[in-house]
Image: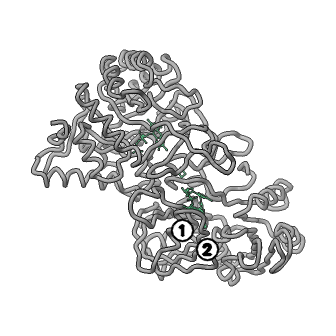
Amino acid sequence: MGRHPVYRSATVLEAKEEGRDYLDLLLREPEISQTTRPGQFLMIRAWPGVDPMLPRPFDIMQADPREQTLRLFVKVEGRGTALLKSLKPGTEVKITGPLGRPIEDFSCPSMAFLVRGAGAAAVVHLAEEARARGIGVYTILSASAASRIVCRKYLEPVSTELLIATDDGSEGYEGLASDLLDDLLRRKTVDRVYTCGSRRFARHVQRLDREGRIKGFVFLEGLMACGMGDCHGCAVQKNGQGGYFLVCRDGPHFPIAEVVL
Amino acid sequence: MIDTSVEIAGVTLPNPVLPASGTYEVDEVHAGFFSPSELGAVINKTIFMNPRPGNPPPRIWETPCGMLNAIGIPSEGLERFLADQLPRLRSLGPPVILSIAGNSLQEWQDLAAAVDRTGSVDMVELDLSCPNLEEGFIWAADEAALSRVVASVVKVTRLPVISKLSPNVRDISEMAVVAERAGTAAVSMVNSYQGMAIDIGTRKPILGNITGGLTGPAIRPLAIHGVFTTFKKITVPIIGMGGIATWQDAVEFLLAGATAVAVGTQNFVNPLTMKEVIEGIAGYVEEAGFSSVRDIIGLAQE
Ligand SMILES: Cc1cc2nc3c(=O)[nH]c(=O)nc-3n(C[C@H](O)[C@H](O)[C@H](O)COP(=O)(O)OP(=O)(O)OC[C@H]3O[C@@H](n4cnc5c(N)ncnc54)[C@H](O)[C@@H]3O)c2cc1C
Ligand SMILES: Cc1cc2nc3c(=O)[nH]c(=O)nc-3n(C[C@H](O)[C@H](O)[C@H](O)COP(=O)(O)O)c2cc1C
Ligand code: FES
C-alpha cells in the first residue's frame, strides 16, 4: 500500500441530506482512508453508463483509518451531485484517490481558516491534523444565512476559536467574514491563513499576504476530467511568471501569492 | 493461450492496446493503477519544438457522453522532453511511440530528425490533426499540406511514421490514402471532432479557445465508420480510437479493421480501462475460438 492514487470501489455507509442542497456522504474504503493526507481530494463516480461521463472532484473532508471511512461534504449543484444525493446506503461507488498534494508543513504556532459555504469541507482534515499537533486553530465560517452554515459540527471540536458571519445577520456577525479575520489578526498571533469557497475572501487574503501580515493559501476549484495531471484541463494562471499550474497536480491548495485569482 | 501481439510497420506490440496521445501519463502518479509494462505501446503527449503554455481556461467542458477540450497542447519543448521524459518512457518496456507536431515543414523535419537521433524511439506519430491550436491550422485537413509534411518527414527519419488523421474533413479515408502515398507506415484515427458549447447565461462560448475538440463515447460510431471505410482503401495498418470505454468497444474497432486501438478520454473516467481492455480483447478472441488477435482484424469487412 503506497501513497499513489488508486481506483477503488467504495461502499456508501451514510448519505445524509442537510437542508435542501447539501449532502454528508460517508464511504467505506480500506485503502484511501489510510493513505490520504490533509489537503487531498478524490474523484467519485456513482452512476453506471457514460452519461454523465466524468467523475466529480471532492475534498476528502475526513478520513478514519481505523473505521476505514472517508467523509465528503457535497453541495448539490448539477447532474452529478444530484445523482450523489440519491445514493442509498449499501451502494457501490467508484473513487480515485488520494489526489493532489498533501499539506505536510505544520511548522507554525497557529492557523486560521476563512471559508464560505461548502468550502469548509476543504479544511476539516487539515484543521484536525493541526489540532492533533497542538497548533492553534481559528475558524471563520461564512454563509449567506444561518441555515447555510455547514461543517460546523466537524470544525467546532478542533477549533481553538470558531467565529461565524452571515450576510443577513441571522447568526453571528452580520457582514463580511473577512472583517472577523482582520479583527482576529489584531487579537491573536496567526501566521497562516487558508481560504476556500469565495473569490472575494481569497483576494482579501492575497492582500494580507502581500502586505506581509500572514502567509496565505487558497484552495482552488477547476474543471477537472482526470484529477491527476493527464488532461491539463484544470489550469490556473501563475502569478507573474506566466504559464499555468494544474489545480489537480500542483494544488488544489496554493500559496496565494503564486496564483491569479 | 492466444497470441495477443500485433505488428505495426515492423514493430511488434505485445498487445494491441495503447494510450491515446495526451490522455495518460505513464509517470509516478500512475504507478498505483497497473504496470505500464502491460501496455501494447507507450506514447507521450504531443511535443512541440519550443515550450508553449497552452490555452487559457476554461479548457474542458463535459457534454453528453463526451467532453470538449481546448487544451492547446502545453509543452515543455523538445529538448527538455528528450532529457527528462524519454529515458523513463524507454525504460518501461513496451515499444515507444513519440508524438510530435511542427509549426512549419522545417520544424516537422527538425523534430523527426532529433527524435530519430535519440535512438530510443520505435515509431514517430505526427499529430497532424489537433483542432485546438491558436494557429488554427489542421495539416491533416488539407491534402497538399498533409502530403508535404508526411513526405518530408519520411525523408529525414528511418523510423516508421504514423500519421494521426483528423476527422474534420469530408472523407477521412481519402486523407489516409494521401498519407499512404506520401509514405506513412501507419495511420492513427481519429483525433477529436471540432465542436463548441455556449453558456446561455453569459451568451458567450464556454471554452477559453472558443472552439474545442469532442471526444469520448459520443464520437465512437463516427470513428468506427472512419476506420471501416479506410480499411478497404489502404494497405498500411490503422490504429483505431475514438470513444473506447470498454473492451467491447475496442473489439468493435478491431473488427472494423484497426490493427491496434488507443484509449483516450476513458482513462480520465477509469484509470484501469486499458488493462481491462487488454484482458477483455484476449478473452473475446479466445472465447470466439481464434488463436490470435490478428485473426479478428477487419472481420466485419467480409
Ligand atoms: C479539487 C476540488 C475539490 C472540490 N471539493 C468539493 C467539496 O468538498 N464539496 C463540494 O460541494 N464541492 C467540491 N468541489 C466542487 C465540485 O466538484 C462541483 O460542485 C461538482 O463537480 C459539480 O458537479 P455537478 O455534476 O453537480 O455539476 P454540473 O454543473 O452538472 O457539472 C458539469 C461539469 O462541471 C464540473 N463542475 C461544475 N461545478 C464545478 C466546480 N465548482 N468546481 C469544479 N468542477 C465543477 C463538474 O465536475 C462536471 O465536470 C470541488 C472541486 C474541486 C476541483
Ligand atoms: C484532453 C485531451 C488531450 C489530448 N491531447 C492530444 C495530443 O496532445 N496529441 C494528440 O495527438 N491527440 C490528443 N488528444 C486526442 C486523443 O489522442 C484521441 O485522438 C481522441 O481523444 C479520441 O479518442 P477518445 O475518444 O478515446 O478520447 C487529446 C484528447 C483529449 C481529450
Ligand atoms: S484534472 Fe486533468 S490535469 Fe487536472
Is label 2 in a helix, a strand or a loop?
A: strand
Residue located at (42% from left, 15% from top): B144
Residue located at (52% from left, 55% from top): A227
Q: In the rendered image of this protein, does residue B170 appear above or below residue A9?
A: above
Is label 1 in a helix, a strand or a loop?
A: helix
Query: Is tag 1's residue or tag 2's residue first in the polypeptide sequence?
Result: 2
Kindly report the distance in space between the C-alpha atoms of the residues bearing marks 1 and 2: 10 Å
Is residue A198 among what the camera can see?
yes
The answer for which chain carries disc 1 is: A
The answer for which chain carries disc 2 is: A
Residue located at (9% from left, 51% from top): B289
Tell me the tag on residue B163.
none
**The image quadrant in which ligand 2 is located:** top left
Which residue in the structure is indicated by mark 1? Answer: A82
**In this orientation, which residue lies closer to the viewer: B209 or B151?**
B209
**In this orientation, which residue lies closer to the viewer: B176 or A43?**
B176
**In this orientation, which residue lies closer to the viewer: B134 or A41?**
B134
Which residue in the structure is indicated by mark 2? Answer: A22
The image shows residue B93 at horizontal and vertical percentages of: 31, 43
Q: Quadrant of residue A221?
A: bottom right
> What colouring method underlies this structural image?
one colour
**Would residue B122 appear left or right of A135 to someone viewing this image?**
left
| Cβ of mark 2 under 8 A from ligand 1 | yes
The image shows residue A93 at horizontal and vertical percentages of: 43, 69
Q: In the rendered image of this protein, does residue B22 appear above or below residue A107?
A: above
* Residue type pointed to by label 2: Tyr
Image quadrant in which the N terminus of chain A is located: bottom left
